[in-house]
Image (cartoon, rainbow, N blue to C red):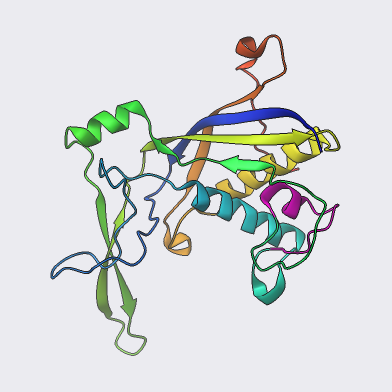
Amino acid sequence: MKLQKIINICGTIELLSGLHIGAGDVALEIGGLDQPIIKHPITGEPYIPGSSLKGKIRSLLELRYGRIGSNEGPCDCGKEDCLICKVFGVGASANKATSIGPTRLLVRDSFMTKKWKIDFKNGELPLEIKYENTINRITGTAEHPRPLERVPEGVKFKFDMSVRIFEEDDEDTILKFVKQGMALLELDALGGNGSRGCGHIKFEEIKVIKDNEEQEEKNLSSYLSLNLM
């Protein structure tokens, strides 16, 4: 299997509503948040893990094409003609030999753009605390308020992906598939609590750069169409 090229897809992600990507199991201090967001361990800045972005795009494409794997997990068929397994990798639950080769899509962590990094460092980007409740169906009153930390609407992050194309791959098909996943994500939500308003995003300033083109630097105006095909 020979690597033909690596295609870079980059741009910005704009938050159209508050974003909550949870920090996982953390020690809960008295008076502290029970649902904090993930932050960089050194700078304290919020960021979008590549695993969150890639995982949500994958799950939406699995739902779109009915490719849910065993035990309702990721698709784990490992078949040559399965774009899910070829582009995103075979599910961890798979226990079989496969000839599809390495994962085609690499998704890096997304960090805030320079403007928002400066605002955060200067204390001009306060993180949002959104209180959620359950409603008592009998009395109609709100109960059990719980604070949810979010990155506020309007903040932008830089995203960066690489698509590996091997000699037997159909480049256009793979790029179209990734594009469709990005379009589905714009219509759905990133992170947690999407059904309650969190995680509405928009991809902007998208650039596609191919490493084997002589005019690579002049190709930066090539944009993906984010319409569903």
Q: Is residue 76 left or right of residue 58?
A: right
From the top left corner, tell me how far across and down residue 10 is, in percent: 55, 30
| Residue occupying the point 22% across, 64% down | 33
Instruction: Label the magenta part by its dominant secondary structure.
Output: loop
* Camera sees residue 96: yes
Q: Residue furthest left?
A: 30
From the top left corner, tell me how far across and down residue 39 is, in percent: 31, 49
For the C terminus, the quadrant is top right
Q: Which image quadrant is residue 178 in?
A: top right
Instruction: Please check the rendered image and state whether residue 76 is part of the magenta-colored stretch, yes or no.
Output: yes
In the displayed structure, 179 sits above or below 4; it is below
For the N terminus, the quadrant is top right
| Residue occupying the point 67% across, 36% down | 163
From the top left corner, tell me how far across and down residue 113 is, in percent: 37, 30
| Residue occupying the point 76% across, 47% down | 101
Q: Residue furthest bottom?
A: 138
- Between 91 and 73, the residue placed more toward the observer is 91
Q: Is residue 206 left or right of residue 215?
A: left
Instruction: Please check the rendered image and state whether residue 147 is part of the magenta-colored stretch, yes or no.
Output: no
Numbered label tally? 0
From the top left corner, tell me how far across and down residue 105 is, in percent: 65, 42
In the displayed structure, 71 sits above or below 179; it is below
* Camera sees residue 228: no
Q: Which residues are magenta?
A: 75-89
| Residue occupying the point 36% across, 38% down | 155
Q: Is residue 161 left or right of residue 163?
A: left
In the displayed structure, 13 sits above or below 51; it is above
- Between 187 and 28, the residue placed more toward the observer is 28
- Between 145 and 170, the residue placed more toward the observer is 170
